[in-house]
Image: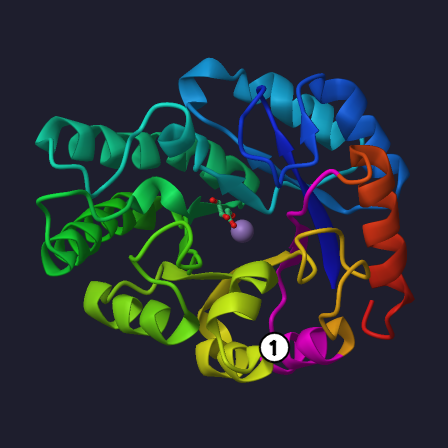
């Protein structure tokens, strides 16, 4: 199974991203530690030079398994569930704007908090309808290029819109697109899914991407999750994608990345 870690192309506020800024030297370090890929967190594709990003990543022998989009929410407040239709439309357009780079790299486009939260004056049902409409439109736009989109169940402390694996599968059912799947994140599953391995089995071949952090959102091995068992369940689904580190840069970014990969590679599965 291949391993990646998240790298933001720009400075960002979200804390569970170990590497931000100074792209080239971060890519070199990540490759040097033995990772196979970098998951790129890109706020706005118009702000990055895709050719240059790919040149740097390829020069270090890395792949780009996924593109994270959450900074458009975190830094700009875009979401599919805003009361303002212009903001909802902008969130959909921003998702679509990732399609060309995703097509070039084979990356999955991640929808985390870009779906948004339930804002005052909006019902949960209305918000979910907007999420379904938005993702149907994005999947239709991505399909001709063979691009896949992964919705991430996210814990209750960040949103009420799709917290666990079962709700994620229900959403996929409603969207009804074969290029729509799920991103499962062990940090969120530890809070929301009664048995993480069962959640993985439930999602099966609809798992398009996978985030790892330990129970405390430190690097795997720093908390109490049973990664041997969790990743065995993932392998048993036939998953061929990346396991991507999304954890706090603690005690510092370099140490967390090195400890995380050392621990994961020490498991039989890698
Ligand atoms: C993003 O992948 C994630 O896991 C969320 O916690 C972001 O808010
Ligand atoms: Mn995540």
Left/right placement of residue 246 relative to residue 99 reads: right
Which residue occupies 45% across, 31% down? 71
Q: Is residue 139 above or below residue 8?
A: below
Which residue occupies 27% across, 66% down? 171
Q: Which residues are magenta?
A: 229-249
Q: Quadrant of the C terminus?
A: bottom right
**Dot 1: what SS?**
loop
Pointer 1 residue = 238
Q: Is residue 242 magenta?
A: yes
Q: Is residue 68 above or below residue 196?
A: above
Q: Nearer the viewer, residue 93 or 131?
A: 131
Q: Position of residue 37 (x, y in %)?
A: 71, 43
> Total of numbered circles in the picture?
1
Q: Position of residue 55 (x, y in %)?
A: 68, 23
Q: Position of residue 262 (x, y in %)?
A: 90, 55
Which residue occupies 87% across, 75% down? 268
Q: Position of residue 38 (x, y in %)?
A: 68, 39
Left/right placement of residue 262 relative to residue 102 reads: right
């Amino acid at each position: 199974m291949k391993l990646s870690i998240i790298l933001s192309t720009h400075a960002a506020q979200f804390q569970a991203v170990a590497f931000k800024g100074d792209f080239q030297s971060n890519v070199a370090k990540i490759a040097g530690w033995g990772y196979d890929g970098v998951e790129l967190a890109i706020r706005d594709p118009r702000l990055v030079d895709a050719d240059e990003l790919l040149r740097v990543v390829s020069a270090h022998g890395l792949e780009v398994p996924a593109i994270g989009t959450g900074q458009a929410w975190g830094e700009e407040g875009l979401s599919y569930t805003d009361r303002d239709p212009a903001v909802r439309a902008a969130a959909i357009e921003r998702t679509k704007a990732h399609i060309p780079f995703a097509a070039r790299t084979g990356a999955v486009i991640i929808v985390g908090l870009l779906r948004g939260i339930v804002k005052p004056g909006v019902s949960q049902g209305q918000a979910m309808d907007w999420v379904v409409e938005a993702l149907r439109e994005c999947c239709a736009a991505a399909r001709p290029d063979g691009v896949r989109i992964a919705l991430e169940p996210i814990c209750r402390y960040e949103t009420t819109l799709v917290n666990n694996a079962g709700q994620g599968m229900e959403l996929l059912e409603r969207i009804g697109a074969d290029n729509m799947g799920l991103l499962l994140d062990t940090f969120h599953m530890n809070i929301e899914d009664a048995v993480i391995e069962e959640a993985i089995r439930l999602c099966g071949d609809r798992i398009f991407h996978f985030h790892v952090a330990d129970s405390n959102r430190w690097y795997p091995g720093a908390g109490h999750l049973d990664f041997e068992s969790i990743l065995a369940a993932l392998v048993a689904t036939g998953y061929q994608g990346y396991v991507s580190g999304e954890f706090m840069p603690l005690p510092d970014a370099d140490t967390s990345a090195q400890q995380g990969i050392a621990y994961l590679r020490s498991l039989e599965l890698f």
